[in-house]
Image (cartoon, coloured by chain):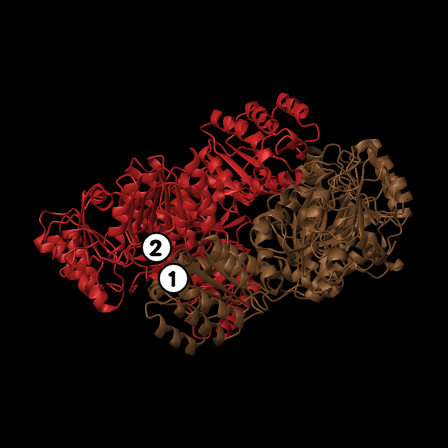
Chain colours: A red, B brown
Amino acid sequence: MLTSERTLSLSSLFEPASVAVIGASSDPNKIGGRPIAFLKRAGYAGRIVPVNPGAAEVQGLRPAASMAVLDAPVEHAIVALPGHQVLAAVQACARAGVRAVQVFSSGVAESGAAGDAERAALRSLARSGELRLLGPNSLGVFSTPSCFFGTFATALDGAWPRPGPVGVASQSGAFGSYFFALAQARGVGFSRFVATGNEVDVDVADCIEYLATDPSTRVIVTALEGCRDGRRLARALLAAHAAGKPVLAMKVGRSAGGAAAAATHTGALSSEDRVFDAVLRDTGARRAHTLEALVDAAVLASSSPPPPSRDVLVVTTSGGIGVLSADAADEHALALPPIGDRAAHEIAALAPLGSGRNPVDTSAGIIGDLARYAAIAGHALASRPYGAVLCFLAHIGRNPAHWAQLRGPLGALRARHPSLPFAAVLTAPADVVVELEAHGFAVFDDPSRALAAIALNAPRHTRAPRIAFDAPDPALAMKRAPRDEAEARAALAALGIRFPEESHVHDADEALRAAGRLGYPVVLKVVSPDITHKTEAGGVALGIPDASTLNREIADMNERVARRAPKARRQGFIVSRHLAAGVEVRAGVHLDPVFGLVASVGAGGVLTEWLDDSVIRLAPVSTEEARAMLTEARVGALLGGFRGSPPCDLDALAQQVSRLTAIAAASSERVRALELNPVIARPEGCEAVDALAEPIGDPT
Amino acid sequence: MLTSERTLSLSSLFEPASVAVIGASSDPNKIGGRPIAFLKRAGYAGRIVPVNPGAAEVQGLRPAASMAVLDAPVEHAIVALPGHQVLAAVQACARAGVRAVQVFSSGVAESGAAGDAERAALRSLARSGELRLLGPNSLGVFSTPSCFFGTFATALDGAWPRPGPVGVASQSGAFGSYFFALAQARGVGFSRFVATGNEVDVDVADCIEYLATDPSTRVIVTALEGCRDGRRLARALLAAHAAGKPVLAMKVGRSAGGAAAAATHTGALSSEDRVFDAVLRDTGARRAHTLEALVDAAVLASSSPPPPSRDVLVVTTSGGIGVLSADAADEHALALPPIGDRAAHEIAALAPLGSGRNPVDTSAGIIGDLARYAAIAGHALASRPYGAVLCFLAHIGRNPAHWAQLRGPLGALRARHPSLPFAAVLTAPADVVVELEAHGFAVFDDPSRALAAIALNAPRHTRAPRIAFDAPDPALAMKRAPRDEAEARAALAALGIRFPEESHVHDADEALRAAGRLGYPVVLKVVSPDITHKTEAGGVALGIPDASTLNREIADMNERVARRAPKARRQGFIVSRHLAAGVEVRAGVHLDPVFGLVASVGAGGVLTEWLDDSVIRLAPVSTEEARAMLTEARVGALLGGFRGSPPCDLDALAQQVSRLTAIAAASSERVRALELNPVIARPEGCEAVDALAEPIGDPT
């Protein structure tokens, strides 16, 4: 099914004209009674059909005995039945022509062989007909524009959603509804909410794509636990980006412990978090690492358009809070450009005890005449373009006399700059907070949090995202899966990867002849299909200056390797020229279970494990992309010329990285990973020293 | 004055038996009226004497016309007068035998020559007599045990402090009072509060020392902007540590931008933030980087004794929140050890749809019978020792029926473990939050914040703190300040720092003779008093293999250095043996304006600037301390043996670092900084390659 069809059909999920509740209950606290109570409370204008074979009346509505005997077709059905009745209910929905079915029930299609079969049956019902299926184990859907509340979320008990620009697509219902409760309490308004649960059919990528096209949604919040098809998720995020809608994303399972907990909890395929992170960044999504940061970012995003730049004006009544704000701005890569000279002069007249060019410190002395606070902020704001404003107001909102002085001028100032986010930071009673929110302030009680929220919404340098790739070039395919390093190297060399000249030798005589031909100093390395870390095994000797040293080293290496890796099969040695010094880089590409082929570069050689330097992109990558990756990596500082040394040949290096990823793409049936480590980068050219290939299946 | 005397005398500041308010006002909203209104509201039992020459009555009290005509002496006086009247008022207080004077007024002793003179006059009044002086520009003091409220803080307008274990010593009044307002709203109770302002006499170190001895204070919160005497601050922090009182500290000005803002704001001496950070860590203080983190840590600290370990039990109703908690635990270096097998079995019976060994996921299925939640947590908690508990409760507190099921069993569970912190994470109405706080829960709405607060309070490995040092050894003093690298090297070598054998030569002939004696390969380095970064100037050549190469290199180097550093005086070359490869380490010691002599170690050579690897301690350091520093540094991983290479001789290296700091301590009148970079560390021994000395004054 094409993406557009998949997405289009979600309108029956979010905005149905009629809804059946299968397993309807008269008790508004039960899972089958809650959606009916919510729909009635919301004033849903469509038809509500409780389905319950035994009841004469359900919450004032006339029920149908079953889906087979409806008076008229319904567009959307909610299944709130015990797990073992779910499959039959969905089949009945399909027969009745329902377009969207939600399954609240848990304990369906979750694990084991029976679960797999049920999952397959539900999916084939969804894919074969015209029906889309949400869940099982979904908390449901709500849409404020159409007053549709097909959910049993207890979060709605004390917190009814206001209409607003934020659309939520969460995998976990508990997570999504907890986010909703926190954000609702902070004044955020919502367009749509969906929790996708076990994702037998509709998944979070579908929902993000739907929200990207939804005119009532301006900001998308998504909470992810795992993912089956990473490239579809990436496409959905790009669709939101293209539609100009910021995606605020949270993805749990960052740490080893978190990933283990996620695997237990969801059973989903797991990808390295850093791959997820790279994809989120490259598709323009903004990733928060805590619920609070996600909520704060949504508060700011729903109060105004995003900041046009990362330049922030901070106006504070306290020097200490100004210093703290400067620290936080630095931490979040925001700038605090100084206000203009004339404005500084005008401000000095208004607040003689104040100081600072930005943060602007009005000093507590202005408490007697707080209209000056707004005047000072106005002068500063007029003096040069800023991307956002932070107003620290301490306890001003707690003193009615003080607040009466400030509220008018501050509201007027905010109204003069409707396209800028204004964060107000203060402790104040609820009515003052609500008034500030109504004026379009995003309200915080901590300046660091306000700046983090500005930063998460602010523009940043993102490369042009790319998800669709050219077909692999068959000319770059490896003819067979390499069985050891020598074969990997030969195959890669034949496809355009540059290595130093070398010989594969089997004894000291051959080695001495080869070294004589290559010229000293030489490098000696053991060849074995069983040894991946040759240095640790004692199988590498560098800078061998002459024949007698080489002769002795061959004996020593044989002894060392036999001792450290006694079971490894040895197949002779590689003798090569010892290369002139350069910067050591690692370049790799591997098949990720979620995202497919993934490229990475970083510091190589002994620095690889020590520094953990890694920049990741979906592969294959162009030469231009490879160049950007190398520049972003920590090793990029060395490549660019460091402490007087000349810069390395980045073009040659980027071309080799790009080529490696193209070879991997063309050889994806034979190898799941290729790595060059180190590649020696020099002012002119580069050469790979070691190559590693991980074959798929039996390499013979 | 001795520390103990200084501290002892602060009882008149915090717990006076009588107080005069100079500049007293009848208006309880004015700066001279507020403390009187607060003292009356608090029910202060001591005598309150308003001082106002013109009034017949002030807020119901009979005023004195001046400090010269008091009926009886007062212990404590508050000065709330315009800046130009302050000095005379403090002099009058001294004559009247006042023991503690607070100056609220700003615009006194702040800047310029007049300010310096006024500052000196105020300080000499304080130091010559029996009087201690707080401020100027202080927000004041309050003490809940004695109901003394000598402050004009507007934060008290809507938030009257509860008595409790938290004592606050802040430099900035605005910062301290904002912290107070946030923490008070979260249920924290306070013992004392002081804002030290411009610190002419009493400073934040005095106040921390006082709180360390104060029986009503169990936890100390301090907010720092700068510091004049770092070692006194360190001693105060150690006193709190020795008294078993956690110090939760915030120090602003971490970033370059923040430090610049702090310099503008306070005019205090500035030290590198990383030195501050090292001292806070080494004295056992717990540093928060945001106000929120400081408040959260205080909330946890005031709810219970500190966590006995870093092992946390997480019990959640949601798998997704469990994953998020595991991520946050990892980020904050907390462990989530799995619950015992038998407990897991018992829990599976109570929550069949749940999962996880820790985080324990009860699943939302237990909503119907929430007593099971407490039973599950109880089983888990009994199964092995934990240091803290996090209970995620989602929206349970919003539904009265659900809360009625849970409140009793949960409160009983908490009461069974009085010595453990319990964090409750939920969204709930205020009455539920207050009930949880009354039961001794620290209440949060974000699990990541709760875990950060647990981590900040939890035990950690801290070295034995050391602030008092032995007298410098005169035998290790440099006889004169070195004028260039050669002299620095010679002086250090004479005092026990090991360098490779070398010769200072002036032309190619001398160089060739020296190299012949030392043996090839050799290193050639330019000698110049004007070049500190020789590599950048083209003044270093490594691994010169033979005489002809050396001859050519001397000519090349002369040409390169002349081109790159045309103004530098050249004084020949150093020729030395090229050392066998090893790990390059940097060791330095320098005079910090706030903390005195400071030692640092890290990765050396080209890695120094690239990695910014630096472990810092107050100097001098013992061999044992130096060893710990080297192990903590990032380069420590290389020194310990990396990827099959043997470990370096850490004893020899640590001995050299310790020796370098002892030389600096003995030579503190001649040099303000010494650096060895790199020191080449090898499996046996180590040798310094380059030495740098920064002389004090004219080195001749």
As drawn, A372 above or below A300: above
The chain letter under disc 2 is: A
Horizontal placement of A629 versus B209: left or right? left
Figure disc tally: 2
Q: CA distance from mark 1 to mark 2?
A: 11 Å
Q: Disc number at residue A77?
A: none
Instruction: Where is residue A18? Give x, y as percent.
Output: 17, 45
Report the chain holding disc 1: B
As helix, strand or loop, the secondary structure at mark 2 comes to helix
Image quadrant where one finds the C terminus of chain B: top right
Q: Nearer the viewer, mark 1 or mark 2?
A: 1
- The residue beneath circle 2 is A154
The image shows residue A221, relative to residue A108, as above or below, that is: above
Query: Which residue is drawn at the image coordinates 10% and 53% (left, top)?
Result: A95
Query: Dot 1 corresponds to which residue?
Result: B402
Establish if A81 lies above or below B199: below
Which amino acid, mark 1?
His
Q: Quadrant of residue A383?
A: top right
CB within 8 Å, label 1 to label 2:
yes
